[in-house]
Amino acid sequence: MAGTEHSRAPRGLDPQGCIEREGSLGRIPQAFRPVVATARDRILDAFGTRLHSAYLYGSVPRGTARVGRSDLDLLVALRQEPTEADRAEARALDEALDLEFPQIDGSGTLLHSRTRLLSALERYDLGWFVACLCTPLLGEDLAQYLPRYRPDSLLARETNGDLTLRLQRWRKRIEEVTGGASGDAATEKARRSLVRGVSRHLVRTGFTLVMPRWNGWTSDLHAMAEVFGQYYPERAGQMRSAAVAAYEPGPDPAVLRCYVDDLGPWLAEEYARVHGVKAARP
């Protein structure tokens, strides 16, 4: 089956075999256009002359966002390294958007400097992310300074080859969110958020593990899980369940423990065996 899939026409690639940029402002669903317009204005107000450029990514610019279920994902590139004051501005922006617009289930803003996004160290991680997964919203598009990207092992390693480090952070976070009483609204919200975030990352990591063999790109988590299952059928059920939880997260802490005690460690070991470990960051 895997060989048959590989021989079909590549998905998400241009005629030269490079990953096509996904998303556009024209695909934003009508319900989310006021959110994006407000975010654009407030980014300008918050960062002013420090702002180099800003981008949308995720389901909103892909046109697949669901009202009341999808979050707003933003990336802001600054002319200098972000300061604590910049991070506080980003948190305030996210909180205000989440409170004001019921059509989004949270807002998240990534902050990086232009220099870091264009650095050699980040070329096959954050650079690829900007060039292929981000939709320009404000300022000069950094994609013009970045190469075209193929779904190869180098890209796989540098995007998701740090799962072992993430597992350590997730275990710590799980301890923090499982201490509250069952039924406590704040605790359950924190658990759902963590289940969603960890599920998404595991599915994407599972997909990029097999991406070079499949020779294509997709951002649909269910499709990612299905592609992964073609190569690792013994883990296909777990990955499909993770894809479901990524879209419809529940508060059960047992799901998180299964991730960090079973699926996650196996995936980290297999990833390192196949692609190696991501280059260390400062």
Image (cartoon, rainbow, N blue to C red):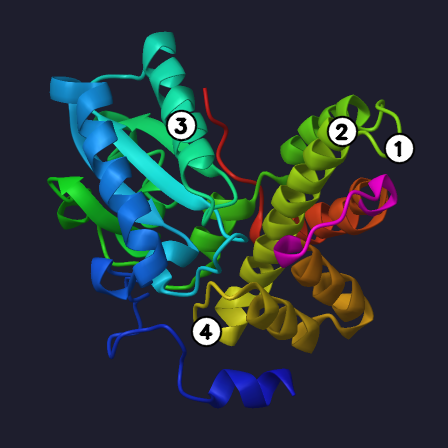
Res. 274 visible in picture: no
Helix, strand or loop for disc 4: loop
Residue at image mark 2: 187
Residue under the point 84% across and 23% down: 180
Residue at image mark 4: 215
In the image, which disc is placed on residue 96?
Answer: 3
Disc with the residue nearer the chain's start (2 vs 4) = 2
The CA span between labels 3 and 2 is 21 Å
Q: Dividing the picture into quarters, in which one does residue 204 lie?
A: bottom right
Position of the N terminus by quadrant: bottom right
Helix, strand or loop for disc 3: helix
Left or right position of 175 against 201 = right
In the image, the segment drawn in magenta is: 246-255
Left or right position of 93 against 119 = right
- Of residues 232 and 222, the one drawn nearer to the viewer in this rendering: 222
The CA span between labels 3 and 4 is 41 Å
Residue under the point 60% across and 69% down: 222
Res. 31 visible in picture: yes
